Amino acid sequence: MKRRRSRRRSTVVESIASAQRDIDALYGLEPVFEPGREPSHELGAASAFHSIQCPYCGERLDTPVEIGTGANTYIEDCQICCQPIELEVQVDSQGAFVGLSVRRC
């Protein structure tokens, strides 16, 4: 009897996880990042959290940075003051992370 209950529970958990991924894909949502939790495989092998300082309000915040796609620039809102921040990811010729520039839009 215990074995059935355990198997049923894992099936329910898998169904919920699958439904969450489907909803995220449908609405174009990104995975939730929780402080103190290691980045999951959903982030990809070439992602990491970096601490930045908002150029508007000066608060420090951690943001996920995707370096697997090479050098790129994107805009993310400050989690504190909601102002748009331009982030520029810099990588070397081998694709290794070199730096992150943060500036006002």
Image (cartoon, grey):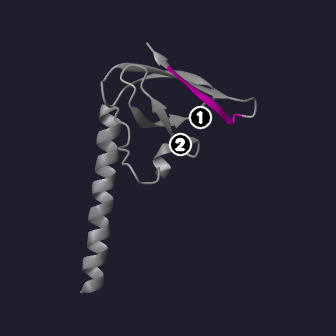
The type of residue carrying mark 1 is: Ile
Q: Secondary structure at mark 1?
A: loop
Q: Are marks 2 and 1 in contact (CB under 8 Å)?
A: yes
Per the image, the residue denoted by label 1 is 67
Does the magenta-highlighted stretch encompass residue 101?
yes
Does the magenta-highlighted stretch encompass residue 43?
no
Dominant SS of magenta comes to strand
Establish if 57 lies above or below 62.
above
Q: Secondary structure at mark 2?
A: strand
The x, y position of residue 21, in whole percent, is 34, 46
Picture residue at 72% right of the left edge, 30% below the top: 92
Picture residue at 35% right of the left edge, 32% below the top: 28
Quadrant housing residue 23:
top left
Q: Which residues are magenta?
A: 95-102
Query: Is 14 in front, or is 81?
Result: 81
Residue 48 is marked as 2
Disc 2 from disc 1: Cα separation:
8 Å
